[in-house]
Image (cartoon, coloured by chain):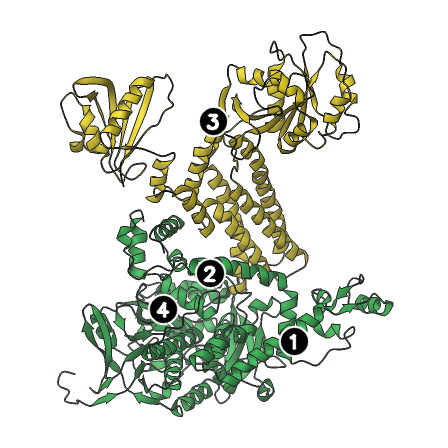
Chain colours: A yellow, B green
Amino acid sequence: MDTIAAICTALSPSGIGIIRISGEDAITITDKIFKSPGNKKLSDAPTHTIHYGHIVDGDEIVDEVLVMLMRGPKSYTTEDVVEIDCHGGILVLKKVFNLVINNGARPSEPGEFTKRAFLNGRVDLTGAEAVMDLISSKSDLARKNSISVLNGVLYKKIKSIRDEILFSIAKIEAALDDPEHMSLDGYEEELASNIHKIQSDIDVLIKSYDNGKIIKEGINTAIVGKPNAGKSSILNMFLNEERAIVTEIAGTTRDTLEESVTIDGLTLNLIDTAGIRDSEDVVEKIGIERSSKAIEKADLILFVTDSSKDPDNEDDKIISMLENKKSICIMNKTDLPQEMTVQEIKSHFEGMENKPEFIRISALTGEGKYNLIAEIKKMFFNGEISFNDEVMVSNLRQKNELVKAKEALDKVLESIDNAMPEDFLSIDLMSAYASLGEIIGEEVSDDLVDKIFSEFCMGK
Amino acid sequence: MENNKNNLTIETDVCVIGAGHAGCEAALACARLGFDTVIFTVSVESIALMPCNPNVGGTSKGHLVRELDALGGEMGKNIDKTFIQSKMLNLSKGPAVHSLRAQADKANYSHSMRETLENQEHLTIKQGEVCEILFDEDGDKKIIKGVRIFTGTTYLCKAVIICSGTYLNARCLCGEAITYTGPNGLQAATHLSESLDAMGVTLRRFKTGTPARMDKRSLDFSKMEEQKGDERVIPFSFSTNPDDIQKEQVSCYLTYTNEETHKIIKANLDRSPIYAGIIEGTGPRYCPSIEDKVVKFADKERHQVFIEPEGLYTNEMYVGGMSSSLPEDVQLAMYRTVPGLENCKIVRNAYAIEYDCLTPGLLTLSLEIKGVSGLFSAGQFNGSSGYEEAAAQGLIAGINAARKLQGKEPIILDRSEAYIGVLIDDLVTKENLEPYRMMTSRAEYRLLLRQDNADFRLRKIGYEVGLVTKEQYDYVLYKDEKIKEEVDRLKNTFVGSATKNQEYLESLGSAPLRTGTSLAELLCRPEITYENLSFFDKERVPLSDDIIDQVCIRIKYEGYIERQERQVAAFKKMEKKLIPDDIDYDAVSSLRLEARQKLKLFKPLSVGQASRISGVTPADVSVLLIYLASIGK
C-alpha cells in the first residue's frame, strides 16, 4: 500500500506536535528530510529506536526533532511507521508535513491509519468499531469511552456475563449426557435467580446507551420561548462562554442549523428555533410551529421566559408543548426589575407530571449560567460526568444485541415458568450467549463485517 | 511376502476393508448403487460383530441410527429383526432428547447382517487380511489403484474404503497380561498401518475397553432392579411396520458399585495398565473405565452397573458401566463387591484394546482422505467410538465413494441437518484427543434434529442418492401433507366456553377457557394431550401414531422450533461463505501463525468450518472474512 502521513496532534499552539507516516516508503521518505548528528540513516537503524536530529529542507534547518522508528509488523498499522516529534508551532508543523508529502507520502484520510491496522489484522472487529466511534466522536468523553472499549472495559463486563450463561448451558448439557453423575434437581430455581441477576446487569448496560449516546453525540438542546424572551442571548451566552469549544456542524441530518458547544465535557447541540445568529427581527417572525418541531427532536428544552414581565398566554402555548420532555425553565433578565416569581410561573405548569427546574439567569451579565450548566449535568448524568471504570455502550448495534440477549433470557424464564423440560432452556440461553458474543467479537457476525467493510473500507 | 509367487489379479469397483458396522454399511451402499464391491474381513464369523455392549442406539446414538435408516442404511432394519428388548429413553424430557435403544441378540444380529451381505447383488465377501493399498502417482496426487491381501492376490479397483475398526496393530491388555490380537481374541491386522504410513496417511494410537461377561447362573437378580422394555415397541427403521415387531422381551438389571468396590480399585491402580503408563493410547472420556470413574468422581459413593443379556441363546451377561483393564484377580474381587455379583463367574475378562487410527487433519467432509483420490475411511479408524457412529460414517463413505465413481458431488450433511453431519464435521474439523462419542450436547440445533423427524430431514437425500425407494419417499411427502392439514385444522377449530367444556378442563387440572380458544392453543397447554382434545373435537378423522406425534410436536413447540430455525439461518450464512480451494493463506497477511498452520492443515471448505478449528480465533475468522470480501468472494 502507498505511504500515508498525517499531523496527529491538534493544530494549535502547544509544546509538541507529531507527524505520523506509515507505508512501505515511510523510512526512505524520512531519510530524505532527516539529518542526525552522525549522519546515520534510519534505514540502517534497528526497529523501535528513537533518533535525535533535524528536519532539513535542502540546507535549511526546519526543526529540531525526535524521530521514532517502528518497522512492521510490530507497529500500529503493521507497516513501517515513522513518527516525527516536532516543536508544536503550527507553521513549523505544516512545513515539516509538506516536506513529507513532497517527498512521496500522501495525506491520509480520516481514520486511515486504523483502517490499515484493521485490514492488516492488527485490530479486530470490535476494536475497529470502537475506532470508528472514536473518529466520529465529538467530545472528549466520547473519545475516552471509545478508548475504554478498545481497552476492553466493555469486553470484560460482557465476558463475565457470558461466562455465567455458559456455565448454565454447560451444566444443563452435561446433565443431559451424563444424568448419572450430573443432577438438575432444583436447578430451575437457581437458574431463574441467576438469570434475574444477569438481566439486571444487562439492563445497566442498555441504560448506559442513552448516556453513551449523549456523550458521543451530544445533547440535542432546543432553546424556545416567546419573542423577546432572550433566546439568542442565551445562545450567545453559551457560545461566548470562555471554556466552551464551539464547532460548526453542517446540517446534514438535521434540518435546522445548529452549533455544538462543549463545556466541561458536556456537549450541547444547540438548536435555535430562530436560526442561529439571525437578527432579532427575524426572531420576531418565528411562530409556534417552528418551536414545536424543535421540541419534538430535542433531548433537552431550554424554555426561556422574561422574568421582568408576568407570564402570559404565549408562554402557556409553549408550556403546553413541554409535556413528557426534559426541560428547564430559564427565568431570564435578572438584571432588570423582577415581576415574575418562581411560584407564579410554576403555577402555569399545573397538572404537568414532570415539572421543570426553574433557574434565574441574566444572559446579559452571565449571572446564574453555572447553575444552568450544573442543572443540565444533573439531569443527564446525575450531577457528574465520570468516565472511569463505568462501562458505557455507545453503539446502537451493541445496544440492540443487549436487548436481544435480554429478550432471549426472558424466554428462558418463560420456559422455566411453563415447566418445560430442561433441554429447552439451553436453546434460548444459547441465543443470549451468541448475542453477547457478537458485541465483543467472539461470535463473528456477517452483518458486522459488512457494516465495517462498508464504513471502513470504502475507497479502497 | 517378497517370495510370494501368487500373481492372481481380480478386478472390481470398490474394496471395503473390514466388515464391522462401518464396513457393512459402506459395502451395502456401494453394491446397492450398482458397483461391484468386495468386502474383506479377517474372519467371516466376525461380520457385524458387537464386541462390546449388546445394544444399538441410546442417547443421541439412537438418532444416528434413525438418520442412517432414513438415508437408506441397514443398521435400523437389522436391529428391528434381532432386538430382544427395546426402550424409548428420556421420555420425561423434551422430544429432542428422546432416544431409542434396543438390546440385541448379538449372535443373531451378526448372522442377520451376514445374510443381508451374502444376498446382496454386486457384493462379494472375502476372508483375508488386506496388507497393502496400491496407488498410482500423478504429480503429488495419489490415485487409488487397488489392494493386495496377505495371500498375494491383487484386487484392482477405483475406490477403497478403510473400515478397520480396532484391528490395526491391535493390542489387548488385561492387567499384566498382554496379547497382540483384535477384539475377542480375533486376529489383528498388522501390515496395513505400514502401507498407509508409506503413502503419507499418518496414524496415531487410541484406546478403548470393554467390561467382563458373566455366567447368568452365578448372578443374584433379586438384589438388582429389573428394567423392562417398553410395552409398545417403536421400530428403528422407518420402513418397519410397528405391528410386525411386537414381541415378548427380556429384561436388563440395574445394580450399583459401593465404597468397597472403590477401595479395591484404588488399592490396585498401580496394576492398571493405564495408570501404570503401559497404555499409550488415549481412551474415551465419555465411556470411561470403572478405574477412571473412581478416580474422576472421587466423591461419588456409587456408580450404576447395568447387567444386560448378550442374547437369547447364551448365558453370558454383559456388565455395563464397569469396563476395566485391571488384572483378572482384581477384576474378580471388584465385581464380587457389587450386590448380586457376589458369586459371579467371569466368562470373558474385561480388557482394554489399543489400535491405530487416523491423525487429525487428513480427513475431508466427504470422508475421502486428503491427497489420495479414491481412498475413503469410516468408523473407529477415523477416531470415533461406538457401533452407531461407525455405521453412520460407513454409509456416508460408501455413498460418497459410489458418487465419486458416478462423477457426482459428494453428500455432505451439515450440523443443522443431521447428527451425522455433526459427527463428521467434528471428526474432520476438531482435533479430538480421544475416541469420539456422539452426544446430544454436541448438536447445537438438536430440537430440529429429532429422532422422530429423521425421515423428513433425510429421506429426500436418500431417495436422490438411490438408496431409498420412490414408495418410501412418497410416504414422507404424504405424511407431511397430512400433518400440515391437521395442524391447520387444529389452529382453525375453536372451542366455546360451555359449562361442560369448563368442567372437563377442570377435571384435567387445566385453567378455564376464554372464548375463541383454538384446539391448537389448548394443545399448547402442558397438561393437555391430543387424546384429551377428542372431547371437544368431534370432526376428527383417525390418524396414525407417527402423524399425531408430529402434529403435537409442531404445535406444542412451535415457538422454540422457530427460534432454533433462526439460529440455523445465522449458522448457514457462515457455512455458505465458501473458501476457494486455491486460497493462499500466506497471502492473508494478518492471520496469526497458529491459525495459518491449522487452516493449511485442515483446508476448511467454508468460513463456518474454519471457525470451528481449534486454534482459529474469532479475530482470525474476521480477518478471513475481510480477506474474502476484499478478493470479491
- Separation (CA) of disc 4 from disc 1: 39 Å
Residue under numbered circle 1 = B548
A84 displayed left or right of B570? left
Residue B374 in percent (x, y) is at 29, 75
Marks 3 & 2 on one chain? no
Residue under numbered circle 3 = A140
Instruction: Tell which subunit mark 2 falls on.
Output: B
- The kind of residue tagged 1 is Ile
B481 or A210: nearer the viewer = B481
Residue A134 in percent (x, y) is at 44, 34
- The kind of residue tagged 4 is Gly
- Separation (CA) of disc 3 from disc 2: 41 Å
Say whether residue A267 is visible: no
Could you tell me which residue is drawn at 33 percent across and 33 percent down?
A: A108
Residue under numbered circle 2 = B572
Front: mark 1 or 2: 2
Residue under numbered circle 4 = B383
Mark number displayed over residue A392 = none
